[in-house]
Image (cartoon, rainbow, N blue to C red):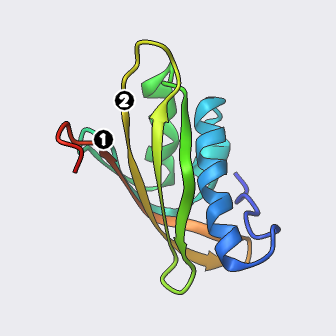
């Protein structure tokens, strides 16, 4: 499995915003290989349900477990801090009858192949809107 070259777009901030788009696109396509290639080998993924997945292989299995995945889209523009390697974005389900939304926060590190995700936290929106 090769690492996705997310750094081709230009500036570090743009690169991090590009990671958010690639993450959502590969999720929606149920492309486990591309999805997992956005993460470091030892990355950690915390699901909406609070389940911790450790390592790229476990993360790649997430799509298989979740099939068919709920289609989502990014809401607004991702918030990026290239100095800290952080990107955060809101998401919402786009399928009728799937009223789900949340916020994904990633801590990333820069590698020869570009930015890769070290840790991802997927938090559901709370009913009280906070």
Q: Which of 65 and 71 is in front in this view?
A: 71
Tell me if residue 108 comes above or below residue 20 in the rendering.
Answer: below
* Label 2–label 1 contact, CB within 8 A: yes
Which residue in the structure is indicated by mark 2?
A: 100
Could you tell me residue 49's position as x and y percent? Answer: 25, 38
Question: Tag 1, which secondary structure?
Answer: loop
Q: Is residue 40 above or below residue 123?
A: below
Tell me what residue is drawn at x 43 percent, y 26 percent. 65
Residue under the point 43% across and 45% down:
58
The extreme bottom residue here reads 83
Q: Is residue 8 above or below residue 55?
A: below
Residue 76 appears at what percent x and percent y? 55, 51
Residue furthest out toward the left: 128
At 47% across and 42% down in the image, what residue appears? 91
Label number found at residue 12: none
Local crowd at mark 2 within 10 Å, few (<14), some, or many (≥20)? Answer: some
Residue annotated with mark 1: 48
Foreground residue among 39 and 49:
49
Mark whose residue sits in front, 2 or 1:
2
**Which label's residue is closer to the chain start, 2 or 1?**
1
What percent of the width, then of the height, locates residue 44?
38, 59
Residue 80 in the image, given as x and y percentages of width and height:
54, 71
């Amino acid at each position: 499995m090769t690492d996705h070259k997310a750094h081709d777009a230009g500036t570090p901030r743009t690169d991090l915003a590009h990671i958010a788009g690639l993450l959502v696109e590969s999720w929606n396509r149920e492309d486990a290989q591309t999805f997992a290639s956005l993460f470091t080998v030892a990355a950690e993924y915390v699901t909406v349900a609070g389940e911790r997945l450790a390592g790229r292989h476990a993360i790649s299995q997430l799509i298989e477990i979740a099939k068919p995945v709920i289609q989502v889209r990014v809401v607004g523009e991702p918030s990026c801090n290239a100095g800290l390697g952080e990107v955060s974005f809101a998401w919402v389900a786009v399928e009728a009858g799937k009223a789900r939304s949340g916020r994904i926060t990633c801590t990333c590190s820069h590698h020869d192949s570009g930015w890769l995700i070290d840790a991802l936290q997927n938090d559901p929106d709370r009913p009280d809107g906070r």
